[in-house]
């Protein structure tokens, strides 16, 4: 059994979150699965228990409400479950011009991608610090490094995740608790296929398999890497975004958005 025994994974019923759960279970970790769809979670939990002989706890929860993280923390504490690794994976994408976007959906995106992630981290990091061991894994994006016209709020929310992760990683230096921001590129998940046709314009070599991504990200977090980027192509894109003039990166991304 791993030293850090139990991993809590949000948004774990599908996509990258589901792949994270599979990878953690394969490596011998017990799991706390969190998502809105209880039936999906229960079916997945049964599958993981049978396949990997690990304990799997299910908590069906919507993380958008402001008090959701606190309620989830309290519910897990009542079950006397000790969370050693927190994977903040739950997130939303909204692909459309800001002027045309639905206000409620936009607010939900910001609440889930930013506030919920911060609240979850704050709640679960305290007992980790008391034990002087633990890991936080926050899922950002290559969008964390560049402006994203036509889904500007999503890109900005992921930029927050990267900055927040790097900031608290330094705060926690020497405490036994590490922080890793996983910044995937385009990944073959349901979120991508629902991106308003955006996925059709992405070359195959830029799309990642979620299981491969999760396996590589797991290794990076276990080594204590603060920022993890998968695929050489994504690393090159980030190099361009961070080293070329911002007006040029903005213009290129804007041209791509207009072409789409």
Image (spheres, helix red, strand yellow):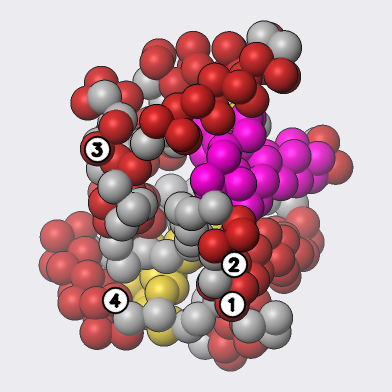
* Residue 84 position in % (x across, y down): 57, 58
The kind of secondary structure element at disc 1 is: helix
In three-dimensional space, the C-alpha distance between marks 2 and 3, rounded to whole angstroms, equals 24 Å
Judge left or right: residue 129 versus residue 38: right
Q: Is residue 141 magenta?
A: yes
The kind of secondary structure element at disc 3 is: helix
In three-dimensional space, the C-alpha distance between marks 1 and 3, rounded to whole angstroms, equals 27 Å
Q: Nearer the viewer, mark 2 or mark 4?
A: 2
Q: Which of marks 4 and 1 is in front?
A: 1
Label 3: how many residues lie within 10 Å, few (<14), some (14-19) or many (20+)? few
In three-dimensional space, the C-alpha distance between marks 2 and 1, rounded to whole angstroms, equals 5 Å
In three-dimensional space, the C-alpha distance between marks 2 and 4, rounded to whole angstroms, equals 26 Å
Circle 2 sits on which residue? 106
Residue at the farthest right position: 171
Give the answer, above or below, for where 222 lies relative to 121: above
The numbered mark, 4 or 3, whose residue comes first in the sequence reads 4
* Quarter of the view holding residue 31: bottom left
Residue 104 is tagged as 1
């Amino acid at each position: 059994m791993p030293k850090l025994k139990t991993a809590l994974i949000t948004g774990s019923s599908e996509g990258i979150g589901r792949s994270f759960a599979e990878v953690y279970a394969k490596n011998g970790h017990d799991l706390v699965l969190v998502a809105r769809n209880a039936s999906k979670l229960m079916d997945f939990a049964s599958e993981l228990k049978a396949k990997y002989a690990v304990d799997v706890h299910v908590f069906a929860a919507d993380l958008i409400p402001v008090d959701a993280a606190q309620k989830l923390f309290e519910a897990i504490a009542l079950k006397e479950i000790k969370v050693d690794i927190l994977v903040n994976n739950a997130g939303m994408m909204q692909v459309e011009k800001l002027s045309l976007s639905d206000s409620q959906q936009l607010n939900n995106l910001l609440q889930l991608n930013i506030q919920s992630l911060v609240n979850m981290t704050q709640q679960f990091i305290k007992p980790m610090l008391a034990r002087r061991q633990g890991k936080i894994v926050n899922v950002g994006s290559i969008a964390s490094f560049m402006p994203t016209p036509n889904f500007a709020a999503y890109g900005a929310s992921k930029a927050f995740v990267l900055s927040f992760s790097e900031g608290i990683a330094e705060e926690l230096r020497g405490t036994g608790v590490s922080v890793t921001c996983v910044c995937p590129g385009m990944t073959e998940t349901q979120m991508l296929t629902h991106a308003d046709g955006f996925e059709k314009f992405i070359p195959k070599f830029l799309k990642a398999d979620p299981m491969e991504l999760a396996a590589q990200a797991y290794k990076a977090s276990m080594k204590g890497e603060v920022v993890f980027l998968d695929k050489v192509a994504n690393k090159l894109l980030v190099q361009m975004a961070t080293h070329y003039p911002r007006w040029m990166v903005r213009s290129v991304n804007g041209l791509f958005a207009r072409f789409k």
